[in-house]
Image (cartoon, rainbow, N blue to C red):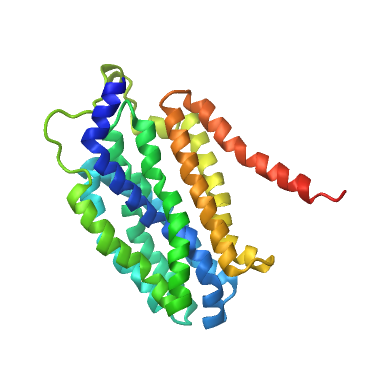
Amino acid sequence: MAGSARAEWRASWKTVAVSSLGISLSTAHVYTQGLFMAPLEQAFGWTRAEVSTGPFLLGIAGGFGILFSGALADRFTARRIIMPGLLLFALTMGALSLASANLWQWYATWMVIAIAQPLVTPAVWTTAIVTRFATSRGLALAVALAGTGLSSTLAPILIEHLIEAYGWRTGYLFYPLFAALVILPLAALFYDRPRIGPVVARATPAQKAAHVPLGTVMRSAPFLALLAASILFALGLMALMAHFVPIASEAGLSRGAAVAAFSFAGLCSIAGRLTTGYLLDRLSSTLVAAVTFLLPLVAVVAAFISSAPD
């Protein structure tokens, strides 16, 4: 088993590395939108709710778009979806820097982004990893998904510097420049390139025999339970990430201290993802998931106890 895992990593580590960077790009706007709230409120007189509605629309529309982008990746390969998706994502995200006081233009821009964002979502980036890894699939997926921790650690610091030095419009240019100048060339050179020699990760006879039609899977109780849990978790997490810096600033932290605290949380998430991926290759996925999702309750209970009056 160890030899098989090493063979998978030798053959496909570049795909994992580029996927991690690509996922960091596709999720960076989630972890940095809080940095733009105060500048947009000051520039256009919008409320925080009005600013947040744009990314909220992206989240709703993009969630449906992922269904189509995932199906396209299964049919045409992830590489053929990622390459044009990166170009379209760069163009649409760059349009945010042209925002005006017209609130409907702001909403329309985010809806246009919703056309491109599903093409570079983690669901598409990880498709190639699932086909290339079997023995070490859990760790490979964890390394790729650690890109969300990378974006929540570094992107707030970089974008905050751009906003402070050059204004919020320049801050929005981070996304298209990172997509076009960094991720696109790396994806063209290294992501899911045609393999030479035998394919490392193949479906076993048992896996082939256990194939179930997609419709049956989507109507099953385990799938519906996972879908419901994912939606609830995403709603809570995204709301916290989007409003962390504004809330922390209003609570008395300086803007710089709030960004630093947010970035530290990103570092912790990288450690958490890597640990979880390692455990998924060795323990029951049900057990790992249950413990992982229960851990945040420890922090909530601790915060409640510490804030309770004596």
Q: Position of residue 275 (x, y in %)?
A: 47, 35
At horizontal 78% and vertical 51% (from top left) the residue drawn is 307
* Rendered view: 136 above or below 40: above
Name of the residue lying farthest toward the right: 310
Residue 57 shows in this picture: no
* Along the viewing direction, whichever of 232 and 24 lies nearer the viewer: 24
- Would residue 77 be found to the left or right of residue 70 on screen? left
* Rendered view: 253 above or below 167: above
- Quadrant (top left, top right, bottom left, bottom right) of the N terminus: top left
- Would residue 109 be found to the left or right of residue 12 on screen? right
Q: Position of residue 259 (x, y in %)?
A: 54, 63
At horizontal 38% and vertical 34% (from top left) the residue drawn is 139
Q: Position of residue 292 (x, y in %)?
A: 55, 35
Residue 10 shows in this picture: yes
Quarter assignment of residue 5 = top left
* Along the viewing direction, whichever of 137 and 215 lies nearer the viewer: 137
Q: Position of residue 240 (x, y in %)?
A: 58, 55
At horizontal 42% and vertical 52% (from top left) the residue drawn is 150
Q: What is the number of callouts on the image?
A: 0
* Rendered view: 23 above or below 297: below
At horizontal 48% and vertical 69% (from top left) the residue drawn is 160
